[in-house]
Amino acid sequence: MNKSYGINIWGDNNFVIKNSTVNINYKSQPSLLEITNQIRNKGYKGPLLLRFPHLIKKQISTLYNEFNRAREEFNYQGKFQAVFPLKVNQFPNFINTLIDVSKAYNYGLEAGSKAELVIAITHTPMGAPITVNGFKDKEMISLCFIAANMGHNITITIEGLGELETIIEVNQEFNKKRKTPVIPKIGVRIRLHSSGIGIWAKSGGYSSKFGLTSTELLEAYELIKKHALLEQLWMVHFHIGSQMSDIAPLKKALREAGNIYADLKNRGATALNAINIGGGLAVEYSQHAHSKEINYALSEFANDVVYLIKEIAKNKGIDEPDIFTESGRYIAASHSVLIAPVLELFSQDYHEKSLRLKETNPPLISELYDLWTSLNRSNAREYLHDGLDHMESLLTLFDLGYIDLEDRSNAELLVNMIIKKSILLLNNDDTEELKKLQNKIQERYLVNFSAFQSLPDFWGLQQHFPMMPIDKLDIKPSNPATIWDITCDSDGEIAFNGNAPLYLHDVDVDTDEYFLAFFLTGAYQEVLGMNHNLFTHPTEVVVDFDKEGNYLLNKLIESQNIMDVLEDMDYDKNHLDKKLKYQIEESTLINKTQKRELLGKLYLYLSENSYLKTIQANNEDPS
Ligand SMILES: *Cc1c(COP(=O)(O)O)cnc(C)c1O
């Protein structure tokens, strides 16, 4: 029942708890609560996605600094370069910021589709690297040639022999009549014998979707040579999968790739000068020390990569190549935080205020009440057992008709209160019994967000994301919590897990706003997010800081309104509009004035986003 929600494990010093709130550990250190309230006071309700440019910059500079430190330490001659793989987050508020904060590093973009390639061509600074992976047709390869003609430093990674044949064909079309041909650089993706680990193991290994086997590689080499493209062949690429929890598979892959590189180079591919180790650098999402996801630090990762490639270069008598990475998750995950209001608690009736004690109660009820009031640290275990025992007896008495519904309700309330209080008092005794009891008394927090839209990897891969309230952190949370999102889908539930428990505060949301923050949502979640139940991308804001250190809320994009959501589904907006109007006008239940009033209301609602504003009809305060 830790009040810090494991912030020291997953937080990387990006956030600090100050008194009751969680604050950004940067410049004036504003609290997430203050920022959230400011945005909500402008009328933007529902979930909010905050982006922090300083955290993008931090990840990029840390990546470069660690690799450059390792290069110096091992006296490594090749350069370090990196690109951002667009598939991890293509949203303009993210990409524009990324390009802006990475200017000093010659940082580039990696594209895996035509649309991503257009983002890369239009956003990568001239001269910074663009790499193009994934399956490519003739049009996509032609786009790469066009980019090269613009002056871009672009590398086509060949994933199969067919692509190489297309490159040769496109090259003839583009350069036949030219004295000085302009050709993109060529990389080869190799199919490794060694594979990754974990859920993404498919990305590497022999059964991988991508890459050339050694036989194909030799054929490719001959083809490249035959068509006088050896000068273009400069990169060997591999990618063993995402969120590598262990560094051992990477080392194995590096030895394999390094030796392939050296062999090609010694065979005559003299222009070869780069090894691209792909992505896979992991992010620590765990909130509990016993369930950490990673067994290495970035410094170790950089040391291993630089050292291993240096060794291979020395043994094979070749120059030390440039090292490329395509880390995406590591760069993007920490930059965004999703903040969502709690709309309701679903077992609030287990509360003292709901008791309906009578003038004279059945003796067991009075006893339960005494147990509850006199419960303390030293008697908690005994009283808890007594309470559970009484509950059994009371339920039997009810079945036999000796007590009434009010008595039964009092019994349920009191036993729940006793369990809750005992768990709080006994929180250091980590027994199985307590863990089981917590499941019984867990509270369901209905939260105004869609897990399908904002945490799709939780739904699809059971990926955990750190979560915590943004206020009340000076108070020990007492409720074992299950999170419910507002979709009508039972999968939109983050269930209480006794082995990695989440505790939240006992709040009355009718009088007290309570927000949950979900961290490390910046990688993959946004574009994988689906509009299940037609809940769309949340309202987003970029949080910049000025020279004085004060925060600025920039580039706000509100979550789509209802009609735009439907239009995106290819509904005809005008038709819907007409139909709504017609149905009100034709109604025989209401008069003209009432019709006008309803139309006004209807259009107001349609202009709003589809997340909930209120939960109960009698609650005037929008959430
Ligand atoms: C997805 C992908 C990456 C990024 O992987 P991360 O685990 O996010 O770093 C890099 N390179 C290639 C080829 C990819 O497919």
Image (cartoon, rainbow, N blue to C red):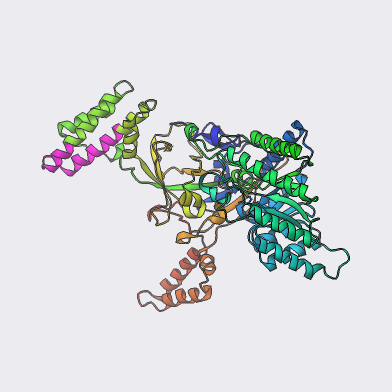
Magenta stretch, overall SS: helix
Q: Is residue 149 magenta?
A: no
On the image, the x and y values in percent for residue 545 come to 68, 43
For residue 477, say whether it is visible: yes
Task: Return the residue found at the far top.
Answer: 378
207 or 537, which is in the foreground? 207
Left or right of residue 309, residue 518 in this image: left
For residue 448, say whether it is visible: no
Q: Which residues are magenta?
A: 394-418
User: Residue 11 falls in which quadrant of the image?
Assistant: top right
Q: Is residue 405 magenta?
A: yes
Q: Above or below — where is 205 with respect to 245? A: below
Task: Return the residue found at the far right.
Answer: 179
Left or right of residue 589, residue 30 in this image: right
Left or right of residue 45, residue 219 in this image: right
On the image, the x and y values in percent for residue 577 come to 49, 73
User: Residue 402 falls in which quadrant of the image?
Assistant: top left
On the image, the x and y values in percent for residue 105 come to 76, 45
What number of labels is visible?
0
Q: Quadrant of the N terminus?
A: top left
272 or 403, which is in the foreground? 272
On the image, the x and y values in percent for residue 433 come to 31, 31
140 or 233, which is in the foreground? 233
